[in-house]
Image (cartoon, helix red, strand yellow):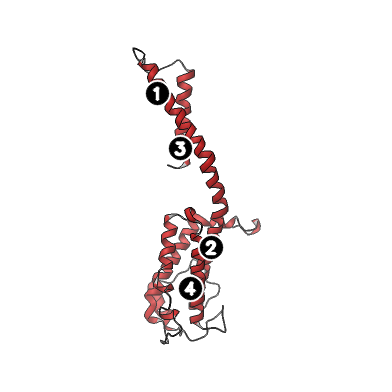
Amino acid sequence: MKIKGLTITAIICIGLFVWINFLDFKFVEWVNGTGAKFEYFIETICLSYLAAYVFYFVNIYLVERNERKTILPFIARNVISIIVNNHSILNCLKNDPKLSLDFYPNKDDYKELLKKVNPKDKAPYYYKNETWTYLFKNRQESTRDLINRIFLSGKHVDEELRRILLEINYSLYLKDDYAFNSENFEKNTLEDYHLVFSNYFDLIRELKNYYDKHLKAYYLTTLPKSLRR
């Protein structure tokens, strides 16, 4: 139960405690003294819950909230770095350095785009004196490094984010010495790997959607106020 539900229960307990101890009105009058015993039972439960609530609120909820204010911006920075890092490949494939981070080709587009890519050719924009193979390897290593940093955040990485990152980390696209990640790759086109690219960038798009929904606000707190939009 989240803190809101716990707080509502605590308010109900306070109300019952006040009713039992300070109000004469009762809905039911019990005979033979059982009413007083029942009230004592309810009062004991309420006081026990309130004591547990105060302990949880002070020692767990407030501590975790402060941790989240520090750690979630760190996670957000690394997640957006993964997104930008990988989206740079799409910039090169589309030959557009200003491509929106919300743009992702459809499955069929990858085949056409990869027909034009010879891994031994020089890659545009980012490493003009290096090949596509170098670019892929560089992005592979930096993506894995960023994922490892995020996992160091432990309990503050929720299950949805953990699943997306694990699927990215263990995808064929990032596999060591796989096809275009190998220095010995001989093919002069990447057309045959369009599904590998499509599946991988579908995960990057899923990560972008998660970032927009859960982490963007935390990332913006790391920027100067003039840049927060």
Q: Which amino acid does label 3 sit on?
A: Leu
| Residue 6, disc | 3
Mark 1 vs mark 3, CA separation in Å:
20 Å
Residue 202 image position (x, y, % from top left): 41, 67
User: Label 4 to label 2, Cα distance in Å?
Assistant: 15 Å
Q: Name the residue under label 1.
A: 41
Q: How far apart are marks 3 and 4 (CA)?
A: 44 Å
Q: Between disc 1 and disc 4, whose residue precedes?
A: 1
Gap in angstroms between the C-alphas marked 2 and 1: 52 Å
Instruction: Give the left or right position of residue 219, taking residue 176 as reference.
Output: right
Amino acid carrying mark 1 in the image? Phe
Asked whether disc 1 touches disc 3, contact meaning CB atoms under 8 Å apart, the reply is no
Discs 1/3, front: 1
Give the amino acid at mark 4.
Gln
Residue 217 visible to the viewer: no
- Which residue is depicted at the point 52% across and 39% down? 57
Disc 2 marks a residue whose amino acid type is Asn
Mark 4: few/some/many CA within 10 Å (<14, 14-19, 20+): some
> Left or right: 122 with respect to 114?
right
For label 4, the residue is 140
- Which residue does the image show at 41% across and 82% down from the upper left? 190
